[in-house]
Amino acid sequence: MRYGLSAIPIRSVGRKVMICLCLLGGLPAENNAGGESRCPTQIELQDTPCPRAEMTLQGIPFRIVYETYRKKSGRQNWELHLIDADGSHPANLTQTPDVDEMYPHVSPDGSKICFVADELVNGEKIRNVYYMNIDGTERVKATGNARQPCWSPDGRIIAYLKGEFDRYTTRDFATKGIFFYDLKAGKHKEHPNKGLHHLYNICWSPDGKYIAFSYGPKANEQVGCKAPGWDICVSDMSGKYVKITTDGNHNKESDWVPIRALIR
């Protein structure tokens, strides 16, 4: 099996996956003899999910948004879905059979989602950055030929990576420079260091007691590539985890919604 877990390094160890992470706002990072910080604990994830009954997730006051490849209006494409942490109340936020929406990231207050959309422009496919309300309304294009957007801590700015080439590619390292889009002003600004190229998964992340990740058999799991049999899982900090999706429809790139959005 392979696991997709944004911004947290993972490595296979026998029949388990070891995840080492320093919890912001949780246990402090310890210092070793050289003065460098290290994570206080390692979390072991078994390579198969637990039965759903072994974890009680109904009380988690958050939801999860993720990308999924499925049939809509007779065609298959990528859509963004929202779901409760226990796997209940799924909702399709995009419902656009002619556009592929992927890589969702939620604003700190839980009111908006930024994402990428692969769409045809003048007959050529291009990956663009959008944002919208958490219920899928008021969709706005932030910029063209860009990818891997994320939010500033105050939710006023979207950071993104500019595409390195004009020609479309699914390669996630094909980026050139960090840029910032001010939602209120509608203006873009490049990072002072213009040599920041080929970056991955820039993000500002919240604290938490649970980890959401994608899980499935060997696949080309990059954004825009299919990963049949992959599902979204939720783990507590002991390493126990369960699937919250079970259809295997290429479910990946999950992110937490900081509030329980009122979408049913």
Image (spheres, rainbow, N blue to C red):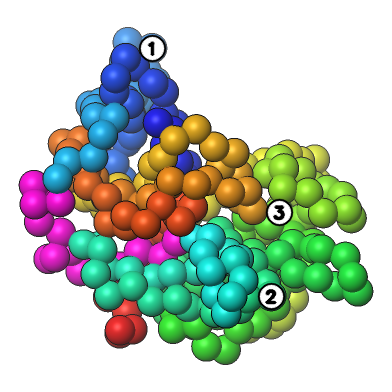
Q: Residue furthest front?
A: 74
Instruction: Classify residue 262 as left or right of residue 218.
Output: left
Q: Nearer the viewer, mark 1 or mark 2?
A: 2
Secondary structure beneath disc 2? loop
Marks 1,3: beta carbons within 8 A: no
Q: Nearer the viewer, mark 1 or mark 3?
A: 3
Q: Where's residue 194, x and y in %? A: 80, 46
33 versus 173 height, above or below: above
> Which residue bears the numbered disc 3?
161
**Residue type indicated by callout 2:** Asp
Q: Nearer the viewer, mark 3 or mark 2?
A: 2
Question: Residue 109: in sight, yes or no?
Answer: no
Question: Residue 198: in sight, yes or no?
Answer: yes
Is residue 65 magenta-colored? Answer: yes
In whole angstroms, how far apart are the C-alphas of marks 1 and 2?
A: 54 Å
Q: Which residues are magenta?
A: 52-66
In whole angstroms, how far apart are the C-alphas of marks 3 and 2?
A: 24 Å
Is residue 124 magenta-colored? Answer: no
230 versus 244 height, above or below: above
**Residue type indicated by callout 3:** Leu
255 versus 35 height, above or below: below
Q: Where's residue 175, x and y in %? A: 76, 46
Instruction: Classify residue 127 as left or right of residue 10.
Output: right
Marks 1,2: beta carbons within 8 A: no
In whole angstroms, how far apart are the C-alphas of marks 1 and 3?
A: 35 Å
> Which residue bears the numbered disc 1?
34
